Amino acid sequence: MSDLSQIVKAYDVRGVVPDQFDEAAARALGTAFIEMLRESGDDADRIVIAHDMRASGPGLAAAFAEGANAAGSAVLHIGLGSTDQLYYASGALGLPGAMFTASHNPAQYNGIKLCRAGARAIGQDSGLAIIRIRAQELLDDLDRVADGPQRVEHLDLLADYAAHLRSLVDLSGIRPLKVIVDAGNGMGGHTVPAVLGDQVLPALPLTIVPLYFELDGTFPNHEANPLDPANLVDLQEAVRTRGADLGLAFDGDADRCFVIDENGDPVSPSAITALVAKRELAKFPGSTVIHNVITSLAVPEIIAENGGKPLRSRVGHSFIKAEMARTNAVFGGEHSAHYYFRDFWFADTGMLAALHVLAALGEQDRPLSGFAAEFERYSASGEINSTVADAKAKTAEVRAAYPDATFDDLDGLTATLADGAWFNLRASNTEPLLRLNVEAPKPDRMAALRDEVLAIVRG
């Protein structure tokens, strides 16, 4: 029997199948999801579900649908989909949703991302804790699990999803671009041909060269986690050897997009955030743009320079989405390559960010490296993880080592030093880790500060 406290995380459900997460747990979570929605006043007469390419996805999704049916809800099943495709369905149809994916995690994992109607995120503080408690009660007392009529309708929304994204960014007039796309055997292999290719819509001025588009949840080529530099090596080599204008890498559920320039060098997600923010502010002057605590200092600077209102948020999609809805922000970006759009129900979609990058590059003649340099102003360490026994004690030790710094505690510990260098130290929600991000005006200063803080954390 599953212990749901081990798999219900801060923002989603995720665990090893079947040891931690099996069809019985999925069925209980389906019932609990509907009960939570009804108790909070949401319409739960019908929900939409999808799954990624993992072998366990169809069975888990079907079991969840049974649990939802047992609670009196009909289910619209859109089949194979990316996470942002599920968000599209939730937003366009006004239905609560459940996406079966473990994102970038290894093959033995699966999970669920849940949302209310309009793609509104569900996390621990907005219903997920209630779902966990209710589902655990059902698992502990199987006699309470009711049966209901099977009401599952199947519908393919891939073309509608692609048409919606295309309607938001016009690529018809850009110069021809050669684009290498690494789908990592994930759902980008399903959505890229529809959105960027001519599978369902007229062709764009793009030559798409596919890498690992075959849907395979065992990830035979490399993990579908572009945050790990090792998983970008094939894409970088392909961009360089094939003379491409840029490369795009998607994670397993294709909700995040990473960008490689024509030299094979990564463009930081902070630079992409600033680039897209500039474009959105040109359309919606004076709007609020959200960025999290670990994006580059260049991001709020560029937002302000373009007439926008930068607003800093905690890391994590449930926090970003809540802030976007509260402030009616036009756009939000995270250094993890999650990008959120007001005209996509405040939800995250890497594909829409990719369209903006393609449009921005294709509207001028410079290579991406020269163009992106406008948005790269500082030297950053990237996120560095350290295993620690006591995260609070180590954080306090680091704070004490910098008595002249300016601190804030919005999300972990952020310290800003007199010369403009800063670092953020955050505890993981799920592991005994401290996550360090460092940025400074010059590479040598960044490296020195990074090493100082790591020496304390790991000492």
Image (tube, grey):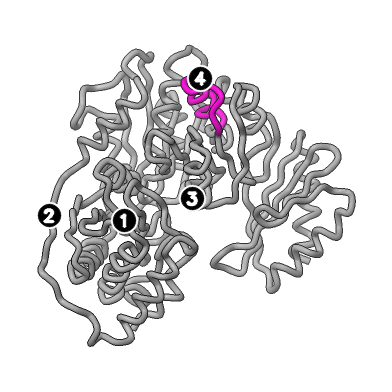
Could you tell me the amino acid type at mark 4? Ala
> Of callouts 3 and 2, which one flags the residue occurring earlier in the amino acid sequence?
2
> Of callouts 4 and 1, which one flags the residue occurring earlier in the amino acid sequence?
1
Residue at which label 3 appears: 317
Could you tell me the amino acid type at mark 3? His
Residue at which label 4 appears: 282
Name the magenta segment's main secondary structure: helix
- Badge 4 marks a residue whose secondary structure is helix
Residue at which label 1 appears: 99
> Of callouts 1 and 3, which one flags the residue occurring earlier in the amino acid sequence?
1
Q: Quadrant of residue 210?
A: top left
How many numbered marks appear? 4
Q: Which numbered marker is on residue 408?
A: none
Task: Report how far apart the C-alphas of labels 4 and 1 lie in the structure.
Answer: 33 Å
* Residue shown at 77% from the left, 34% from the top: 442
Residue at which label 2 appears: 153
Nearer to us in this view, 65 or 450:
65
Is residue 13 visible in the rendered structure shown here?
yes
262 horizontally vs 433: left or right: left
* Residue shown at 43% from the left, 33% from the top: 353
Q: Please report the bounds of the magenta region as a residue range.
A: 274-288
Could you tell me the amino acid type at mark 1? Met
Would you say the residues marked 3 and 2 are in contact, meaning their CB atoms lie under 8 Å apart?
Answer: no
